Image (spheres, grey):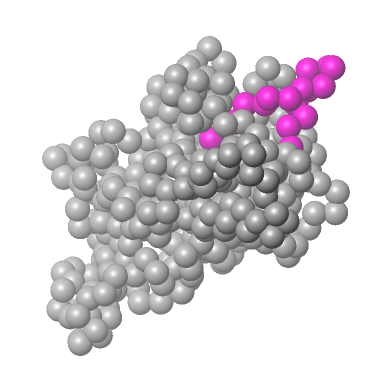
Amino acid sequence: MVVGFRWLKRSWLRPCHRPRRLPASLSLSRAGTALFVLAAFSCAWQHAIAQPFRLPTANRFLFDQGAEDKFFAATPGKTWTTGCFGCVRSDGGQMHEGLDIRSMQRDRHGEPTDPVMATADGTVAYVNARPSLSNYGNYVVLRHVIEGVEVYSLYAHLHSVRAGLKAGEAVRTGEVIGVMGRTANTRQGIAKDRAHVHFELNLFLNERFDAWHRKTFPGQRNDHGAWNGQNLAGVDPRAIFLAERNQGAAFSFLSFLRGQTDLCRVLVRQTDFPWLRRYPALIRRNPVAEREGVAGYEIALNFNGVPFAATPRAASEIRGRARFQLLSVNEAEYRRNPCRKLVRSRGGRWELANNGLRLLDLLTY
């Protein structure tokens, strides 16, 4: 509670209008004290509502310009940018879908002891406490509903998960869910000096992922059911935290999602699939389809394959018979962020690449 109150004073009360300082000779009555505290906490509560996400550890260097290397855990021999979200690995050729947040507390053996906390109110969706089964090591997935939108936060490489934490359990913002570590099943492992929590914010693609995986990759194991990382499409947490800080009460997560930059737009000849039911807030109106009936959906994908908008289309608006049609490509965005390889140019013409086709197949399965 003490830690929480210190954080409250530092982060919540700063932007609010503060009462004038009282003269030293004037003491507050008990009633006055109560009103003063109530006003402060009311202000804090308004700020909390405006900013739905909190950093998952005590590391706040994200907000200090020039101190990024104290926040992000870089890959060996590389700069702090390799701990960011995006096409930051393998010289821009590999996607990193989260933030690698550095440790700030260590025991006498140099191992991290930082508490890892829930980024928002929510429910435990999944706990993996068998690190050998995932390159995430020990990891936890939480489900949140922000402005009517389902968001899934993921916390990976944990040394340990809080005892008794299980799927279906409610958690509150800032509640400790585990301890930072460096667990993983990768051959090279995570060195002690790079200990971090890998943190993601995701949209969920399809509750039928396990069946899709069996069909698409026969014979391959899937130890995590729907909570396989392939079924979680990440948005940039750093951009969200900075937008929250800069916009204050004006910040809207739904607007943030709707404002993603197109990598491409595709036409899906299908009228009912799980994503539509899960994310109705991201469906845009189309009077033509409302009048004539829906024959398919035009879907906008960002460079990481997040479907952030869907527009119903009538049969009169659709050309061709293909199940998936590539309608447009934002070439400037592709040049900035090519690593997911969702589309490709062949003979001067753009087409959906295998990764793009597989993503759409999963989305509509």
The residue range painted magenta reads: 99-117
Left or right of 69? Residue 261 is left
Residue 35: where, in percent of width, then height? 63, 58
**107 in the magenta segment:** yes
Q: Residue at x 48, y 17 (%)?
A: 79
Outermost residue toward the front in this view: 25
Q: Main secondary structure of the magenta part?
A: loop
Residue 41 in view, yes or no: no
Residue 71: where, in percent of width, then height? 56, 26
Q: Who is closer to the viewer here, 364 or 302?
A: 302
Q: Who is closer to the viewer here, 92 or 163?
A: 163
Q: Residue at x 67, y 38 (%)?
A: 6
Q: Residue at x 40, y 32 (%)?
A: 87
Q: Who is closer to the viewer here, 154 or 144?
A: 144
**362 in the magenta segment:** no
Q: Is residue 319 above or below residue 142?
A: below
Q: Is residue 187 above or below residue 224?
A: above
Q: Residue at x 47, y 55 (%)?
A: 50
Residue 363 in view, yes or no: yes
Residue 94: where, in percent of width, then height? 44, 31
Q: Who is closer to the viewer here, 80 or 218?
A: 80
Outermost residue toward the top in this view: 77
Q: Is residue 163 above or below residue 109?
A: below
Residue 20: where, in percent of width, then height? 51, 44
Please identify the quadrant where the N terminus is shown.
top right
